[in-house]
Image: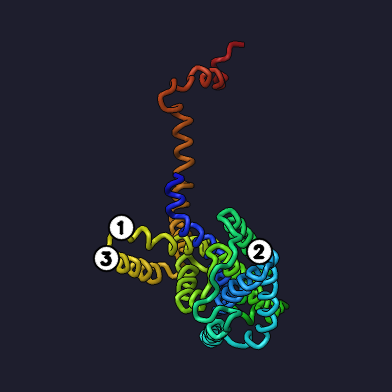
Amino acid sequence: MSSWYFSHLTLIQGMLISIPLALSVQIALRSGVFSFASIGFYGVGAYGTGILTMRGWPVLPAMLLMIVASGVVAYLMSAPLIRLRGLYLGMVTFAFDLILTVVATNGGELTGGALGLLGVPLGMGTGGLLAAALVAIVLVSQLERRSVGRALVGIKASEELVMSVGVDLKSRKRTVFAISAALGALSGSLYVSTFSTVSPTSAGFTLIITTLTMAVIGGTSSWIGAVIGTVIITWLPTMAATIGEYQHLVYGVVLVLVVMYAPEGVLGALRWLWRRLAPKVRMARPSGGAALAATGPPGGPPPDRGAEAEAEPVPADRVKG
């Protein structure tokens, strides 16, 4: 077991780092906000934490500063962005990510230029990554259960309906932006504190596509889908590697099949399967219980018929007065 753990340690750590990032995209898509801004704040968190720790800051204060700062900046930045919808919002936030990549590339000594930051002090082990991932999961799951989360679902279904019941639509959308950015910054901070390096390509186009795939394949209706998608995307290439040159073909086929036949993701497919099987399971339980009561447990003695006979009432014409 220990040999398997150490041989897959990088994958395990990468999966734990990716969970908050996948949640940052899922929470936006769940509310109908098609935004890639959290990927940009992933880079902000990674570079900010790296720069601060290389100048003597402890890891945790540096991470907390980047998380809070990213949330505040995203909340302020969202004021003009919430007027955009759908593809237009996605294009603007994608451009935001590209601008941050250009800034990191041309940042000189501060950002390390095209090579990025090297030799960032290590400050995060697997236990810390697991704790951070669990905190992110608890945060998003509690958000979904509360009135804020229910309002987010309503925003995706019908913004007009949500506004008609008195929900402040702009405030809820800005809150989504802030939380999504904070989760992205958390993921970036974890990355640089674990692998000791970050470059402009770390938060580039590849990461956008990978993170979006995690959220969509798992299912955007719940945090569970984001976690499922992260696990699949992290481990699928490793499992497919056993088939050699057909690895990328299998990977692509799986993605296409999920998108075509499970538009709500793996989580949606599992829910559909449960809805089909649950009635049959419920119907089978009473009949199984009745049969058990009539025949007794398998391999056990037959039911005591004498006790039942004693309990039967005696007809009135057979009673001697």
Q: In this view, does 113 lie above or below 234?
A: below
Residue at the spot 61% in from the left edge and 70% down from the top edge: 50
Q: How would you rate the neighbour count of disc 2 (Cα within 10 Å): few for under 14, some for 14-19, many for 20 or more?
A: many
Of residues 302 and 173, which is closer to you in this image? Answer: 173
Q: Given the image, on which type of amino acid does mark 1 rest?
A: Thr
Q: How would you rate the neighbour count of disc 3 (Cα within 10 Å): few for under 14, some for 14-19, many for 20 or more?
A: few
Residue at the spot 47% in from the left edge and 52% down from the top edge: 278
Q: Is mark 2 on a helix, strand or loop?
A: helix
Of residues 260 and 178, which is closer to you in this image? Answer: 178
Mark 2 vs mark 1: in front: 2
Q: Distance between the residues labelled 2 and 1?
A: 38 Å
Point out the image quarter for the N terminus.
Answer: top left
Residue furthest top in the image: 321
Q: Distance between the residues labelled 1 and 3?
A: 9 Å
Question: Pointer 3: what residue?
Answer: 245
Question: Pointer 1: what residue?
Answer: 242
Question: Pointer 2: what residue?
Answer: 59
